[in-house]
Image (cartoon, rainbow, N blue to C red):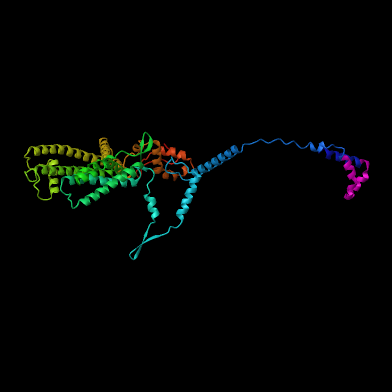
């Protein structure tokens, strides 16, 4: 820049001294080369530092750690991905449970691959039988469905409930037929092989339950989920080996009747998944009564055999079907109907007294249990009827008009038919806040989402609002609110 200013000054000085040069310069631009010696002589007057002084010395740049830089870039990348996921979650419809976490990118890629695999057309599998072809699902689907998980949730897994039912059938077989085969002469050398085969099947069910299913069942202890083998190996002790010394005696299988924990667990799980559990409770209580009568019939035949068949009027006389005759005697004796033959010997008197005492206790217990089952099944209906009766009595006391009484009765009937209860908030208040919120979302979110006022609102605000909603039933013609008035 300094050199250009000097050149301009030199040019103006030359023009003052020789005005002809300016005319030549204006008229003929080709004559400009005559000034080149003067320009070169002028440039030689400036030292070289004039041209280099404009350049600033380069400073050494800061040294960076490549590993730290790579880690920071990776963190920034993950934060951006997380922000995008949360943005998508806010735009999407709200999921049912508030506890769900957004999936990661790897999980989304796996889901996309699964969807692509499912979208591919499946090959048809056919089975040739006789002259026809039958379509059947591939073996891979069977294997995937039958594959057991690493852990089993006994409260939600329906396959575990089905397995418990199979083990319960085996348990009931042992409880009913071991005393029958030991007392009554129904097990003979000709049919021993059939009884032994069924016993082996029951033992296989017990063994599979002990080795395969029970180690996978998880339960909660002290707030932690624990998976461990439960106790119950005593019923699988192989007393059957003693068959070689004492013969095929069913009494050696008495330890198979100790697997009562599985029976009660099956009852609890089945009642939890049934809509009307009281029906099963009535059936189970009836089964208890029939089993006690069965044991009493076996004891009566054993006492008759001990005294001698047909030896007295009290014992079994050996005519007709032995089991049905003994069962009939057990019913009349245990329920204390009466009309039986009087015992003759001391053994018969003691046996009959014990039978009467046990019958009074067992029968009264079963009657009380049946009353509780039926009372629990109709508790809600009884509460509804008592509320209606109390309300009607109150309205009659204060001479409420019949029109209002009819509307009150209609409100009770409609509320009970639609909800099955009068106030559902009483049921939800017993739950924790998270469970209460999950139920409120499933029940009320579809209704709130249709209101234009709440569209685009924050999800947490909608959650808080759902916790404060209360269901109120109005009849046609009832005044709810007035337009342009503030809500209360």
In the drawing, does residue 188 fall left or right of residue 118?
left
The mark total stands at 0
**Residue 465 at x, y = what percent?**
43, 38
Q: Residue drawn at (8%, 37%), measured in percent from left and top?
A: 346
Instruction: Give the quadrant of the C terminus.
Output: top left
The answer to whether residue 414 shows anywhere in this view is no
* Magenta run includes residue 33: yes
Q: Which residue is at the front of the view, 352 or 26?
A: 352
Q: Residue drawn at (23%, 39%), measured in percent from left and top?
A: 372
Numbered range of the magenta stretch: 16-42
**Residue 301 at x, y = what percent?**
13, 44
* Magenta run includes residue 441: no
- Residue 373 position by quadrant: top left
Q: Which residue is at the front of the view, 179 or 369?
A: 179
In the drawing, does residue 282 fall left or right of residue 354?
right
What secondary structure is the magenta-colored segment mainly? helix
Q: Which residue is at the front of the view, 463 or 221?
A: 221
């Amino acid at each position: 820049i300094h050199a250009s200013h000097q050149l301009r000054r030199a040019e103006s000085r030359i023009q003052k001294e020789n005005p002809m040069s300016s005319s030549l310069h204006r008229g003929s631009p080709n004559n400009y080369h005559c000034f080149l010696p003067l320009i070169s002589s002028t440039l030689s007057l400036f030292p070289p530092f004039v041209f280099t002084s404009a350049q600033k010395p380069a400073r050494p740049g800061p040294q960076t750690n490549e590993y730290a830089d790579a880690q920071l870039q990776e963190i920034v990348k993950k934060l951006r991905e997380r922000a995008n996921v949360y943005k998508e979650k806010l735009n999407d419809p709200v999921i049912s449970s508030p506890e769900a976490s957004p999936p990661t990118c790897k999980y989304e890629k796996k889901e996309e691959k699964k969807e692509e695999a499912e979208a591919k057309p499946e090959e048809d599998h056919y089975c040739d039988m006789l002259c026809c072809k039958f379509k059947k699902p591939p073996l891979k689907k069977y294997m995937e469905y039958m594959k057991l998980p690493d852990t089993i949730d006994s409260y939600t897994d329906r396959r575990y409930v089905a397995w418990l039912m199979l083990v319960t059938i085996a348990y009931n077989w042992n409880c009913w037929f071991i005393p029958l085969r030991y007392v009554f002469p129904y097990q003979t050398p000709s049919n021993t092989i059939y009884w032994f085969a069924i016993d082996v099947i029951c033992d296989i069910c017990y063994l599979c339950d002990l080795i395969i299913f029970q180690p996978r069942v998880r339960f909660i202890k002290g707030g932690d989920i624990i998976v461990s083998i439960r106790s119950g190996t005593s019923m699988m002790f192989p007393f059957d080996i003693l068959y070689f010394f004492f013969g095929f005696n069913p009494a050696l299988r008495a330890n198979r009747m100790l697997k009562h924990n599985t029976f009660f667990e099956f009852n609890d799980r089945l009642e939890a998944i049934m809509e009307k559990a009281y029906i099963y409770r009535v059936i189970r209580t009836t089964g208890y009564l029939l089993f006690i009568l069965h044991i009493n019939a076996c004891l009566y035949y054993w006492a008759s055999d001990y005294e001698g068949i047909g030896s007295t009027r009290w014992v079994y006389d050996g005519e007709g079907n032995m089991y049905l005759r003994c069962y009939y005697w057990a019913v009349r004796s245990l329920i204390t109907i009466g009309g039986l033959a009087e015992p003759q010997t001391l053994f018969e008197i003691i046996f009959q007294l014990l039978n009467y005492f046990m019958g009074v206790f067992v029968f009264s217990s079963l009657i009380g249990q049946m009353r509780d089952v039926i009372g629990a099944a109709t508790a809600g209906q009884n509460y509804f009827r008592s509320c209606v009766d109390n309300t009607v009595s109150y309205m009659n006391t204060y001479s409420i008009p019949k029109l209002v009484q009819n509307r009150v009765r209609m409100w009770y009937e409609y509320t009970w038919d639609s909800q099955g209860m009068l106030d559902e908030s009483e049921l939800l208040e017993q739950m924790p806040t998270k469970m209460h919120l999950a139920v409120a979302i499933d029940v009320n979110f579809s209704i709130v989402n249709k209101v234009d006022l709440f569209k685009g609102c924050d999800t947490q605000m909608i959650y808080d609002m759902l916790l404060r909603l209360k269901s109120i039933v109005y009849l046609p013609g009832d005044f709810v609110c007035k337009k342009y008035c503030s809500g209360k």
